[in-house]
Amino acid sequence: MGFWMFLGSFLAVGLAIAGVALYICKRIRGFSRRVFGTTDLLGTLKEIDTSHLDTPRSLNGCDSLLLPQILKDFPDFDVTLAKTYVRDKLREQFGHQQGFKIHNVVIARYLRAASQRTIVFQAAACHRENSKTVQKRYDLHYTHLLSSASDSVAANCPNCGGALGYGVTACPYCGSRVANVLGNTWTFTEVSET
């Protein structure tokens, strides 16, 4: 008699555990259907875990805010051409990687120093590594250097001879428009992965 009671109790506990497990599974499927639109929660979580591999890295794009400042200092600056140079520089340095592809290029920062101006471009790119897509983000510093070797800024207006400062687009003395007063030397000073 004791054996049958033990077996009955064991079966009752087993059925209770199975009932609770079925109830929990049903609730998880319902939650998964409501939130993710599918009852396969585990498959969805695996998909979410690997989705970052195919999604381009987000960028800190400030083109609309920084471009007016850049154009104030350099009225002839061509942002489309500069972004083409950025893409060319990335291909030159990283194009050897299998399946290298550039997704987007944006202006992230504009730095002003006494003797130079630097536009920091950010680029999202990817390549194949061990049969997986690897997403990367790069910062490229595109710097305008003075044409003279010294840090002092010295240029004169071709109309009246007045002294012109860095980034001046019109003579403060006679009002004549001046362009590229100190040359137009742009170069990449830093390329780094972020």
Image: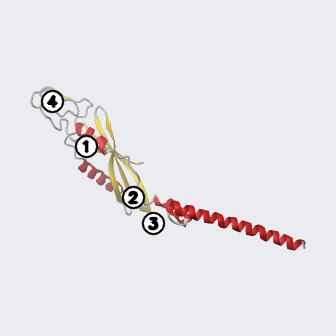
Which residue is under mark 1? 186
Which residue is under mark 3? 131
The CA span between labels 1 and 3 is 38 Å
SS of the residue at dot 1?
strand
Vertical relation: 148 (above or below) 42 = above
Which dot, 4 or 1, sits closer to the camera? 4
Q: Amino acid at mark 2?
A: Cys
SS of the residue at dot 4?
loop
The CA span between labels 2 and 1 is 26 Å
The CA span between labels 2 and 4 is 46 Å
Q: Position of residue 182 (x, y in %)?
A: 20, 36
> Measuring 53% from the left and 66% from the top, which residue is drawn there?
43
Which residue is under mark 4? 171
Q: Amino acid at mark 1?
A: Trp
Q: Are marks 4 and 3 in contact (CB under 8 Å)?
A: no
For disc 4, the neighbor class at 10 Å (few under 14, some 14 to 19, many from 20) is many
Q: Which mark is residue 126?
A: 2
To which quarter of the image does residue 17 belong? bottom right
Which dot, 2 or 1, sits closer to the camera? 2
The CA span between labels 4 and 1 is 23 Å
Q: Position of residue 92 (x, y in %)?
A: 32, 55
The CA span between labels 2 and 3 is 12 Å
Q: Position of residue 49 (x, y in %)?
A: 51, 59
Q: Amino acid at mark 3?
A: Ser
